[in-house]
């Protein structure tokens, strides 16, 4: 496992901390999964936790951005988003 540095923006923390108490543990689990997976990839040494499209997002120098979110319109669902575009 690599020594992973995590840089977390204030906006990320603020958004993450404002999720409802019944949803937040599920998003914490997604966050842990993303970080543990990044740690297992030797080429990933830094992850930036920030907002992209107003969603908590994880960015590294390799791979594509991962976003997670929950919406009040679908209270029983939470999601992980990833977009990979090849040219």
Image (cartoon, grey):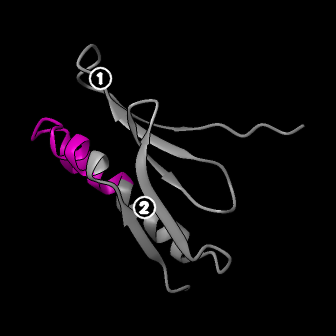
Residue 71, numbered label: 1
Q: Report the side of 54 relative to 62 (left or right).
A: left
What element does badge 1 sit on? loop
Q: Position of residue 24 (x, y in %)?
A: 19, 45
Q: Which residue occupies the foreground of this view, 35 or 22? A: 35
Q: Which residue occupies the foreground of this view, 13 or 24? A: 13
Please name the residue shown 65% across and 81% down the image.
Answer: 42
Tell me if residue 52 is in the magenta stretch: no
Please name the residue shown 85% across and 39% down the image.
Answer: 86
Please name the residue shown 48% across and 53% down the image.
Answer: 58
The quadrant of the rendering that contains the C terminus is top right
Please name the residue shown 69% across and 61% down the image.
Answer: 62
Q: Position of residue 48 (x, y in %)?
A: 47, 60
Residue 33, numbered label: 2
Q: Quadrant of residue 56?
A: top left
Q: How many other residues sit within 10 Å of disc 2, few (<14), some (14-19) or many (≥20)? A: few
């Amino acid at each position: 496992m690599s020594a992973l540095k995590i840089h977390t923006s204030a906006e990320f923390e603020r958004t993450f901390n404002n999720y409802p108490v019944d949803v937040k543990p599920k998003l914490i689990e997604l966050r842990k999964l993303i970080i543990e997976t990044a740690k297992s990839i030797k080429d990933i040494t830094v992850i930036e936790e920030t907002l992209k499209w107003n969603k908590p997002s994880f960015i590294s120098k390799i791979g594509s951005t991962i976003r997670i979110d929950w919406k009040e319109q679908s209270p029983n669902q939470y999601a992980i988003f990833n977009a990979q575009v090849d040219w």
